[in-house]
Amino acid sequence: MSKIEIFLNQITYSLNLRYYKYDLKFKHPFALAAGIREVTPVVYVELESGGFTGYGEAALPPYLPETQESVIRFLSSLDLDRFPGPLQADKMLDYVFSVSEKDFSAKGAFDMALYDLKGKMMSTPCYKMFDAEKENCPLTTFTIGMDKPKVILEKLKEAKDFNLLKIKLGGPFDKLIIETIRKESDKPICADANQGWKDRQFALDMIHYLEEMGAVFVEQPLSKEDISDAEWLKEKSPLPIIADEAVQTYDDIVSIKDAYHGVNIKLMKCGGMREALKMIKQARLFGLKILIGCMSESSCGVSAAAQLSPLADWADLDGPLLISNDPFKGITYKDGRIVLNDLPGNGIVKKVEN
Ligand code: MG
């Protein structure tokens, strides 16, 4: 613990928790194996103490069990009066995690607001608290959803500053999508099948095809339930296979370590920055690759995840680029890499007052 942390820990601060709903609008309707949609509901969290405000975000795509109502219910059940100040972050998070077994997006929003607040009170960017070096920020992907060739070509233009394209697959036109992209671009790609391939031999054939087409890795080819098929695929695959839907929290890493080459860690799945850091350390112990990802989120959530990105092999943190009404400013991108700023906390500034 640093001297400033010891000093600040001795002071009692009041802690105010606020939250409100917001809808993030996609620039293009977003198509995945699970369906198509135009907005993502979110809940923003504000944690205020000592004149500083930390911000967090719970992103709630409809295929996940949490909703804006469930997040607000969870947050309104918290009793923070028992804590003398926000710098006892670990104790506070232990309590927040004890309140329910699920509610990971709500916990994640609280966790990132708490880290943002703590960083601001200590005048320290959060990445420094995690011993991450911003020179090591990885390439981030730019996501291209499943669409008609005309729309895919438009999205390719938007991706011109990015050097790793993430292609959403798992539907009937996968090869057409890849061929459309390859006619225009020779950039490295990665593919996310979102559990859309139903058969392990078909998945292996697709992975061989994708390797020939310049893919770097493949995410969640088969259903998250198919662990034995995933082990079969891992043994035979010429490309790293990354678990996304198959891994939610820290406890899941042990069960998938022999079935995948790596994990996609998202703050919304695991419950925030503290849990994500634990998962990164555990995954590295098993020799797994790390992709740090996001849901459809604004700069608030993505900038929190980006604080951990120097510890990952790749990032999938393009959320703010895909929406038209981001209420925050945060990380930027240069030559396809994430750029962390030196603002304290998660490096975010709120743009509009609600
Ligand atoms: Mg995925």
Image (cartoon, rainbow, N blue to C red):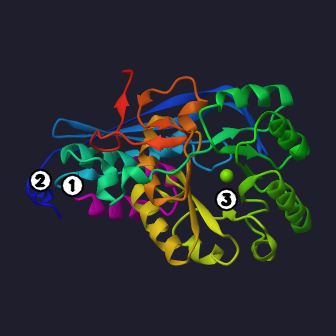
Is the distance from the Cβ of mark 2 to the nearest ligand 1 atom less than 8 Å?
Answer: no
Q: Distance between the residues labelled 3 and 2?
A: 40 Å
Q: From the viewer's perspective, is 162 left or right of 21? A: right
Q: Does the residue labelled 3 lie within 8 Å of ligand 1?
A: yes
Cβ–Cβ below 8 Å for labels 2 and 1? Answer: yes
Taking the spot 36% from the left edge, 55% from the top edge, the residue there is 133
Q: Say which residue label 2 marks.
A: 8
Q: In this view, does 269 lie to the left or right of 13?
A: right
Front one among 202 and 164: 164
> To which quarter of the image does residue 96 belong?
bottom left
Taking depth in this image into account, of 353 and 18 the one nearest to the observer is 353
Considering the numbered disc 1 on the image, is that residue within a helix, a strand or a loop?
Answer: loop
Asked if the magenta segment contains residue 329, the reply would be no
Ligand 1 within 8 angstroms of badge 1 C-beta: no
- Identified at 74% across, 38% down, the residue is 145
Residue in the image at 46% along x and 45% along y: 73
* Position of residue 250 in the picture relative to residue 230 (left or right): left
Give the image location of residue 95, x and y in percent: 33, 62
Dot 3 or dot 2, earlier in sequence: 2
Q: Residues within 10 Å of mark 3 (few under 14, many from 20)?
A: some
| Residue hosting label 1 | 87
Name the residue: 68% across, 46% down: 63
Q: Where is residue 89 in the image (x, y as percent from the top left)?
A: 27, 58
- Coordinates of residue 278 in the picture (x, y in percent): 43, 67
- In the image, what residue type sits under mark 1? Leu
- Disc 3 target residue: 245
Q: What residue type is labelled 2?
A: Leu
Of helix, strand and loop, which one carries label 3? loop
